[in-house]
Amino acid sequence: MQVSFVVMTYNRGGVRVWNLLRSLLTYQTVPAAEVVVVDTSDNAQIAQDVAAACGEMREARYVRRRRDGLFKSWALNVGIQHTDPYSKIVAVTDIDFMFGPHTVEMLLRLVNHQTVCHTIPKRLGADALEVDPFTAERWAALCKAAQPWGESNGPGALQAAERGWWFHVRGYDERFERGLGGMDRDMLLRAARDGMRAVQLPFAATNALHQWHPESPYKDALNHLVDEHGPVRANPDGWGEIEEAR
């Protein structure tokens, strides 16, 4: 049984991409099978940087889909569709995170056809961005320096479920576009309405660390779109790059 990770980026590259990839592909006790990076950047230089980082690691799959704005739900759905069909589990995260060495092992143990896993992350400060944090001593220091996330507990830091379930619910709701906020909570609400049990992993289980960046102007712009009574299956006309036959 194997785990595929999916992440998207829009005009964000640099050391954070390298840190994410290394944390999942070389720092794990059980490495992820792959990390699918969907790059929607309209900044060509950043796109080249992200592509170069992915090119350094055989298990990193670079998917280029240029967009003129932030379409996170759509991009993650494209990534889910590009995961290896042999992966039992698909885990979705954010380009700014990196994870401790037992994350994949924990997902393999806990995710099944009745569960969705998510985790509680912590935040690193601006002075805590390590170029090479992947030694036991450096990693422990970062975890110690990290600060609690806050009231929301960061529902989008990591969301993992069986691959077939992602296709069953048709991924993230693509009404959430040109902004941030809400889509991760919406997904957990839809999972609950589908009878799935949410398993929240504590920080100690995953060491999900958010790499600092200035606050995004897109933050919380889409929270109002969350529909607590909406359908389990989203995107009736198609999701990601799958269009429904009419």
Image: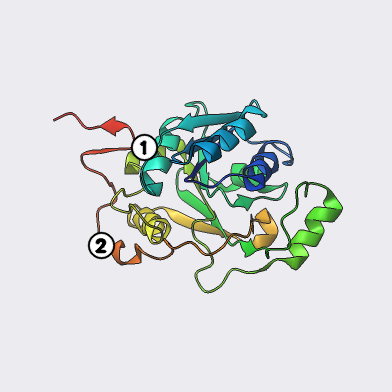
Q: Is residue 48 left or right of residue 203?
A: left
Residue 192, disc: none
Which amino acid, mark 1?
Phe
The quadrant the C terminus occupies is top left
Residue hosting label 1:
167
Q: Is residue 162 above or below residue 246?
A: below
Q: Is residue 195 left or right of residue 84?
A: left
Which amino acid, mark 2?
His
Q: Which picture quadrant has residue 144?
A: bottom right
Local crowd size for mark 1, using a 10 Å CA cut-off: few (<14), some (14–19), many (≥20): some
Residue at 46 percent of width and 31 percent of height: 64
> Which of the two residues, 147 or 67, is positioned nearer the viewer here?
67
CA distance separating discs 2 and 1: 20 Å
Residue 139 appears in the picture as rendered: yes
Q: Is residue 103 left or right of residue 186?
A: right
Q: Whole-percent x and y of residue 194? A: 34, 52
Q: Element under label 1?
A: helix
Q: Which picture quadrant has residue 188?
A: bottom left
> Which of the two residues, 87 or 75, is positioned nearer the viewer here?
75
Q: Is residue 145 left or right of residue 34?
A: right
> Which of the two residues, 228 or 37, is positioned nearer the viewer here?
37
Q: Element under label 2?
A: loop
Q: Residue furthest right?
A: 137
Q: Whole-percent x and y of residue 235? A: 26, 44
Q: Is residue 215 above or below residue 2?
A: below
Tag 1 or tag 2, which sits nearer the N-term? 1
Q: Is residue 171 above or below residue 96?
A: above
The quadrant the N terminus occupies is top right
Residue 33 appears in the picture as rendered: no
Q: Whole-percent x and y of residue 141? A: 81, 61
Look at the numbered discs 2 and 1 and tell me whether their residues touch, using CB distance below 8 Å. no
Residue hosting label 2:
229
